Image (spheres, rainbow, N blue to C red):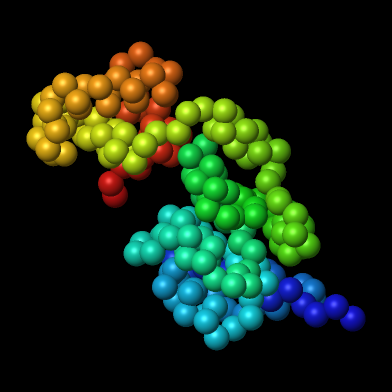
Amino acid sequence: MPLPIRILIVDDHPVVRSGLTSMLSTKPDFEIVGAAPGGAEALAILEREKVDVVLLDLRMSGMSGLDVLRALVTRKGAPRTIILSTYETDEEVYRAVQAGARGYLIKSISQNEIVEAITSVHDGKLYLPRHIALRLTERMSRPTLTSREVEILEMLAKGLTNKEIGKVFQISENTARNHVNSIIQKLEVSDRTEAATTALLRGIIQLES
């Protein structure tokens, strides 16, 4: 008889952790190793427990899901990870898969789909629902913004002018303008306002809560 799949749940919402634990504990093929409220706690559990699959939220206070994924890449025998998020923006799906996620699900999906995803990912497969796979394909066809361009996009979303952006990053107004023009071109938009709006919609940047 095969050993149960050992699962770690990582989410900063207690209701989500409790719900997933209750739901998945009813499956004889699964064993819940733990339910961590954040990334640091998850990594601590992984130091002492053998885990096959991690169900990981992306947007968490403190250490984000992406931070956890990047930390796991460096670990020998790291578990396979499925993102379970409320959000499915192009950029978040792309960044998660780039960082090593083997699946990406939305929290509103059915119990059967979560079970199928865990089993598939444990077997070494990539699990992406069709509409998320399409999002990923579309995102991969677009040019990637540099880290500086993402920072400047955050300034655009706050309404800063090129001169003000230059002061923030200690660059000339002309250099700031060149960065903005590059952003507009890469995002295939008409102006800086549309660039900021598009970046928010795609999940490239996020509004401060």
State left or right for residue 190 relative to residue 176: right
Camera-nearest residue between 68 and 105:
68
Residue appearing at x 20%, y 27% in the figure: 176
Q: Where in the figure is residue 41, as x and y percent of width and height?
A: 44, 76
Residue appearing at x 54%, y 63% in the figure: 73
Task: Give the position of the N terminus as an image quadrant.
Answer: bottom right
The residue most toward the bottom is 48
Residue appearing at x 21%, y 22% in the figure: 177
Camera-nearest residue between 143 and 133:
143
Residue 195 against residue 117 in the figure, above or below: above
| Residue 17 visible in the snapshot | no
Residue 90 against residue 69 in the figure, above or below: above
Camera-nearest residue between 109 and 139:
139
State left or right for residue 92 relative to residue 148: right
Residue appearing at x 69%, y 76% in the figure: 6
| Residue 184 visible in the snapshot | yes
Residue 157 against residue 194 in the figure, above or below: below
Q: Where in the figure is residue 44, as x and y percent of width and height?
A: 47, 80
Q: Where in the figure is residue 39, as x and y percent of width and height?
A: 44, 68
The residue most toward the right is 1
State left or right for residue 95 relative to residue 31: left
State the count of labels.
Answer: 0
Q: Where in the figure is residue 114, as x and y percent of width and height?
A: 70, 58
